[in-house]
């Protein structure tokens, strides 16, 4: 327990349970890393990936929005990033299938 009375449940797990927890969380961490990387590449590739992103969104008749990046100091930014990635799932699938973009 800490000062606020909160308990970190992971600290009371034995080694086997901690390994199981880590292996069950790994797919989520991997998915987050991929979405972060895609968001970063879209934002910072103004000559190649960004125009392709906007073209795909226009083609799919979706709102032309950037995928927000999560920011360490904003508690809800990871949720916002995931929410937009899910709303634009078809566009994300299409842009990642374009092999010439290097994604």
Image: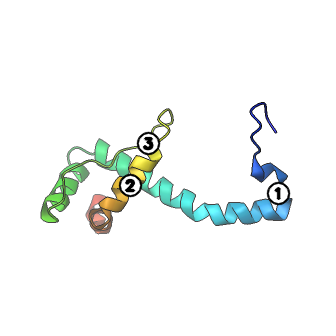
Res 13 label: 1
Res 83 label: 2
Residue 62: where, in percent of width, then height?
18, 59
Res 77 label: 3
Secondary element type, mark 2: helix
56 left or right of 37 in image: left
Q: Is residue 103 visible?
A: no
Q: Residues within 10 Å of mark 2 (few under 14, many from 20)?
A: some
Q: Earlier in the sequence, mark 1 or mark 2?
A: 1
Res 75 label: none
Q: Nearer the viewer, residue 78 or 23?
A: 78
Q: Nearer the viewer, residue 65 or 39?
A: 65
Q: Residues within 10 Å of mark 1 (few under 14, many from 20)?
A: few
Q: Is residue 86 above or below residue 81?
A: below
89 left or right of 22 in image: left
Secondary element type, mark 1: loop
Question: Which quadrant would residue 89 be assigned to in this image?
Answer: bottom left
CA gap between label 1 and label 2 equals 31 Å
Q: Which residue is most to the front?
A: 5
């Amino acid at each position: 327990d800490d000062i606020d009375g909160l308990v970190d449940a992971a600290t009371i797990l034995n080694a086997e349970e901690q390994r199981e927890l880590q292996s069950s969380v790994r797919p989520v961490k991997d998915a987050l890393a991929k979405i972060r990387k895609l968001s970063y590449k879209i934002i910072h590739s103004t000559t190649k990936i960004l125009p392709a992103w906007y073209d795909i969104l226009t083609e799919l008749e979706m709102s032309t929005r950037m995928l927000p990046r999560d920011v360490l100091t904003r508690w809800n930014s990871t949720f916002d990033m995931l929410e937009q990635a899910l709303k634009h799932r078809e566009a994300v699938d299409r842009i990642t299938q374009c092999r010439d973009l290097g994604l």
